[in-house]
Image (tube, helix red, strand yellow):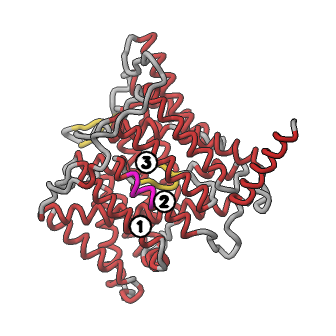
Amino acid sequence: MSLESTLKAQKTSGVLESVFKISERKTTVSTELYAGFITFLAMTYILAVNPAILGGIPGMDKGAVFTATAISAAIATLIMGIWGNYPVMLAPGMSMNGFFKGMLLSGSVALVWHEALFGIFLSGVLYLILSMTNIRKAMIESIPEDLKLAITVSLGLFIAFLGLKNAGIIVSNPIILVSMGNIADPKVIIAYISIFVALGCMVRDIKLATFISFVSAIVLTVLADMFLGTNNAPIPDQFISAPPSMAGSFGAVFDLSGITADKMFDLLFIVVIFLIVDFFDGLSTIVGVGRDAGIIDKDGKVPNARSALVADAGGTVIGSVLGTTSITAFSESGIASSQGAKTGLAAVVVAGLFLVSLFLYPLFSIFSAAMVAPAMVVVGIYMIGRLGQIQWEQKESRIAAFFTIMFTVLSFSPANGMAMGFISYSFSMVVAGKGKQVHPVIYVLSAIFMTYLVLL
């Protein structure tokens, strides 16, 4: 190596050291680069899943959603990596995109897609304000841990149910509401096989379970097209192209001409729901990955907490303006920490790869909702694991968790589930003579949810 090359390498190393504290956190550049690459592979399904889900909403263009997904994920992850210095990666949340679609298509709200995105934009702005002030501590402490866990589980079951429906494994039945689909259908068989491939990975503690189930569905669908004559994954003429235009979605959130007085409760409800879920889901992932990476000490203090939460909240604001649902910290970030990542350099690698993916839309465009359904089921399995953390011996927690989960699934609306969870918790605590232990924020939210259900 020449003297000039050596000096350049030393300078680069010095910059990385000053920004990411490589030596201080006892890691290496090569470890961070490798962990970032592996984690990106585990997250690539979102580039197919998000457009497949949101692209099915009238008015939302699949190509525009793809571009919005890649850019917003890249920006948010870059902010997290450089400013927060956490090996935490962000992208549109799987539970939130499914909820968003189900809410709009089921008629739960009277809003159209860009009006609902404006609600997400407002939730992101509020989240950003909370992240930059000490109010975030009060917010964290106001909602009982058991209620947060129940909300997470209910969203996991909702997204899994939606995945099973998209795969044709569960179909509607006019007599018993729902029933099993036709297992002889190649699409259904592929979904089953892909799900069980993922289950095998999970049992063997292979952390790429979601990604592997996604790849399995792709390969099997292509093989079915070749040998069975189906046409579920048409191969594109080219794999590289310019990123799809966002002309129809960029800035659409600011078209408020259709938001009338009778839509205000629906808008408020979206703001509240997405704020709560995004805030606590992002925080739990940041804390979990931070502990695994050894960044958070035994006292539980979260270094750079404000920066990390700002990256999470800022991502949601950016994503909604570009044309996608809430950006959140991905649980797949745990793969990075398990591979030894301890700094934001791994996140910077992922951000760069998301930008490269912008030019691979023809490849990602072949994926249908059925092909990404197994990945949605796997996400649900991961999220339901938090059931065991709920204090079931506490009757008030048990009641609230039951109502949250049951109403989410049976009414096909996480909004309804969350509403019933807050209301039943407040009611149970008052009847049990523990009303003073309930934070005023919970009572306010319960009142809002009751008004929502009355006007539903």
Q: Position of residue 444 (x, y in %)?
A: 29, 79
Identify the image quadrant of the C terminus. Answer: bottom left
Identify the image quadrant of the N terminus. Answer: top right
Q: 407 and 452: which one is in front? A: 452
Q: Are marks 1 and 2 in contact (CB under 8 Å)?
A: yes
Q: CA distance from mark 3 to mark 2?
A: 15 Å
Q: Nearer the viewer, mark 3 or mark 1?
A: 1
The answer to whether one can see residue 203 in this image is no
* Residue at the disc numbered 1: 127
Residue range corresponding to the magenta coloring: 314-319
Helix, strand or loop at mark 2: helix
| Residue 190 occupies quadrant | top left
Q: 73 and 334: which one is in front? A: 73
The residue sitting at 56% across, 33% down in the picture is: 197
Q: Nearer the viewer, mark 3 or mark 2?
A: 2
Tell me the tag on residue 94: 3
* Residue at the disc numbered 2: 312
| Residue 19 occupies quadrant | bottom right
The residue sitting at 51% across, 23% down in the picture is: 219
Q: 217 and 12: which one is in front? A: 12
Are there few (<14), some (14-19), or many (20+) residues within 10 Å of tag 2?
A: many
The answer to whether one can see residue 78 in this image is yes
Q: Amino acid at mark 3?
A: Met
Q: Amino acid at mark 2?
A: Asp
Task: Assign the magenta stretch its main secondary structure.
Answer: helix
Q: 34 and 252: which one is in front? A: 252
Q: Position of residue 68 (x, y in %)?
A: 40, 43
Helix, strand or loop at mark 3: helix
Q: Earlier in the sequence, mark 3 or mark 2?
A: 3
The residue sitting at 35% across, 74% down in the picture is: 425
